[in-house]
Amino acid sequence: MVHYKLTYFLSRGLADVSRQLFHLAGVEFEDERLNRDQFLERKDTFPFKQVPVLTVDGLEIPQSMAIARYLARKFGFSGATPEEQAMVDAFVDQFKDFYSEIHDYFYAKLGINQLDGDEQKTKVLIPARDKFLALLVSFLKKSKSGFLVDSGLTFADLIIIDNMTTLINWQPEYADGYPEILAWRDRVMNYPKLKEWIEKRPVTMA
Amino acid sequence: MVHYKLTYFLSRGLADVSRQLFHLAGVEFEDERLNRDQFLERKDTFPFKQVPVLTVDGLEIPQSMAIARYLARKFGFSGATPEEQAMVDAFVDQFKDFYSEIHDYFYAKLGINQLDGDEQKTKVLIPARDKFLALLVSFLKKSKSGFLVDSGLTFADLIIIDNMTTLINWQPEYADGYPEILAWRDRVMNYPKLKEWIEKRPVTMA
């Protein structure tokens, strides 16, 4: 049997989606969580000097989206056809662009930069949200499954919704003007095996 | 036969890697290039309101990396095994992070923001370069193929090298302290069918 180890911080952050994929697939994995000191001690040993890292029988794979895509393809959560997989990848990259756009807000809330969170909310979060959520709504309205692509739940839904959980923890009104987004979020978070994991995972703000 | 159309600006930018993949595979495609006005006229009709867009028999796929990955998987330039494909995806995402880090420099050189290119070179380009190229060197030194992964050329090599062509156009000394990077760049650019395309493609700075 393949031995999987996922190494990350204590938070959900960039790794919980991969943990979710293991739970959805019912596949065992070692859920290794490092505190800041443990990370710094091992930093230089990681392939890209960062986490998450997925270790598959000794091979270390870095980068959160690459890890999630690898598991999603293996476990059947990456889209049904090459064309649908390309659309799923497009949503993931669009999310990555959104995440870059809100970087100053996100890092202010995490206490990593010295900027003012409220100021960054107005300056970067709200404009980025309005653009990103409107785009997602246009796809959700056409979807046959209620998820981003017609064949059902994929890692693109998981990535965007898990990040939204953090944004809603910080700004409870975040998606209030977007009923289709809130309905989609409920659909994802109530997906049977995912709901189970959400109920038992450690509760963290981010 | 599948009809492919790739829609982008006149530049290499975020789309030439997909053009390169068509040439490497010997597959015909419609190379649609828009000027600024033509883009603005059609902007709202594109799925994510941006280009590149790949149209595959009527289905429109957005996001440059998603398009490149789709073509690379189809044409055999995405890695040989699921694990190698994950590593290729990790390099691509690491590049995307690098590209975000140098955003202020890149957009200054393109004339899209009002920042000073020389100042941004010192502030963001050089530190990001030193980190990114050192990481790539550590993999190139171990590679059996001379490319980023052991099985040979992939779209990760193409994406990073094509972007580096732009950086070298702007800063000819960009990779001078990195002999392994320069050797790798030669290897990619002299890859037979790629060399052919590089010689015949429209010459643009970016």
Image (cartoon, coloured by chain):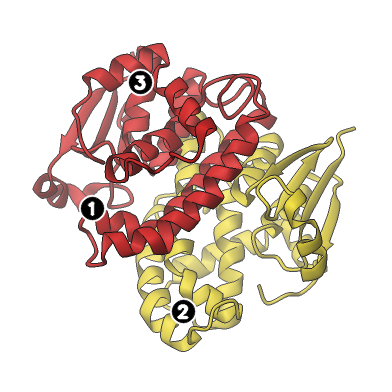
Chain colours: A yellow, B red
State the separation of the CA atoms marked 1 and 2. Answer: 38 Å
| A135 lies above or below A88 | below
Label 1: chain letter: B
Disc 2: CA contacts within 10 A as few (<14), some (14-19) or many (>=20) = few
Image disc number at residue A154: none
Task: Residue at 69% x, 57% y: name it.
Answer: A15
B110 or A55, nearer to the observer = B110
State the separation of the CA atoms marked 2 and 3. Answer: 44 Å
Image disc number at residue A176: 2
Task: Residue at 70% x, 59% y: name it.
Answer: A16
Query: Which quadrant of the figure has residue B135?
Result: top right
State the separation of the CA atoms marked 1 and 3. Answer: 27 Å
Query: Which quadrant of the figure has residue A131?
Result: bottom left
Give SS at disc 3: helix
Image disc number at residue B22: 3
The residue that disc 1 covers is: B110
The image quadrant where one finds the C terminus of chain A is bottom right
Q: Position of residue A180 (x, y in %)?
A: 45, 66
Q: Position of residue B177 (x, y in %)?
A: 48, 41
Discs 1/2, front: 1
Q: Position of residue A192 (x, y in %)?
A: 73, 56
Q: Same subunit under labels 1 and 3? A: yes
The amino acid type found where label 3 is placed reads Phe
User: What is the total number of numbered labels drawn onto the structure image?
Assistant: 3
Give SS at disc 1: loop
